[in-house]
Image (spheres, rainbow, N blue to C red):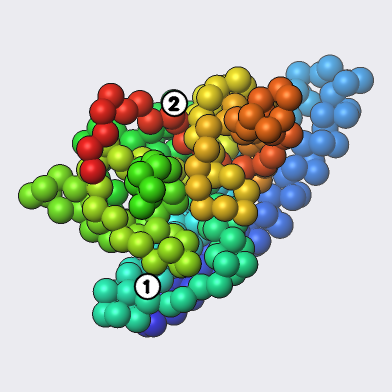
Amino acid sequence: MLQVQERLKSLKTLVCEIETERKRNETNINNVIRLTKMASEDKSPALNHKLKTLYKVGLQDALQEETLIRQALSKIQDIRNIRNERRIQARNAGNKETIRRGALMKMLQISAQTLPLFVSKPGEKIPHLCGSIAADSSYIAKPGDMVAALVKSEEGEENWILAEVVQYVSSTSKYEVDDIDEEQKDRHVLSRRRIVPLPLMRANPETDGQALFPKGTTVMALYPQTTCFYKAIINQLPQTANDEYEVLFEDPTYPEGYSPPLFVAQRYVIAIKQNKKTAS
């Protein structure tokens, strides 16, 4: 608890600093707006020089504000990680919390909305597991991570489900995962080829659109209000950081073979897993 409190105090300080910095920057921004209007009529070198100076100051102010915001977001992620570690410790100690179906759906929605947003700096490479960027081939998902898992039902039917990693056993190269659906209460032991790690960060459409699936791409997406992934086609991309994909699920019950447009968060849209021959 002390770890969280310390980070909350730091976060509060950073939020106050961000607000102070933002208010301080307003004066310069207002001056830039005022002089830009004047420059449309007055082309004097002196005014242009002053405007250029204000732009430089504004750029430095924006960089400072960006630094503070990134530090605040880092503290938020630290808190999320600590709380997740404690939840895993409680589960391992036999204190797994039972979550009702409605609460689970709400939790999954909030989890997707609050997934860290990656906003690249100029020239920065987009990391793996950001948006549509798949995990590195050597990547091992950590305990508590969300994954799509290909499991076989008692009837022999294979389905991609939303699951949580319990552990990875390096000696067998297999994962132990729990079905996220509390009603199932199933634990599965699966090979790596049956696991697809979900994104750890959202991609910002305004700065990193290349980390989004192009329109028309066939993907696997979590069907709304369920914990199963199905094939779908990207119909519309997110336009802002808070938007979701608009997808068309494959559905033979409709004349066109696809469902009406449905919205799915970035976290629950992943690339199709190509399995040559799966092994449990």
Report whether 96 appears left or right of 214.
left
**Is the residue marked by circle 2 packed among few (<14), some (14-19), or many (20+) residues within 10 Å?**
few
- Per the image, the residue denoted by label 1 is 87
Question: Residue at image x 84%, y 24%?
Answer: 39
Residue 244 image offset from top left, x and y in percent: 65, 41
Q: Note whether 87 is above or below 219 in the view shown.
A: below
- Name the element at disc 2: loop
Q: Quadrant of residue 83?
A: bottom left
The amino acid pointed to by label 2 is Gly
- Residue 95 in the figure: left or right of residue 52: left
Callout 1 amino acid: Arg
Which x, y percent locates residue 6?
Answer: 41, 77
Q: Secondary structure at mark 1?
A: helix
Q: Nearer the viewer, residue 202 or 251?
A: 251
Check residue 262 in the rendering and tell me which mark sits there, or answer none.
none
How far across and down, in percent of the image, does residue 28 sit?
73, 44
Q: Quadrant of residue 7?
A: bottom left
* Residue situated in front as seen by the camera: 264 or 112: 264
Question: Which residue, given by chain and number where applicable, does mark 2 sit on?
Answer: 123
Q: Quadrant location of the C terminus? A: top left
Instruction: Name the image quarter holding residue 273.
Output: top left
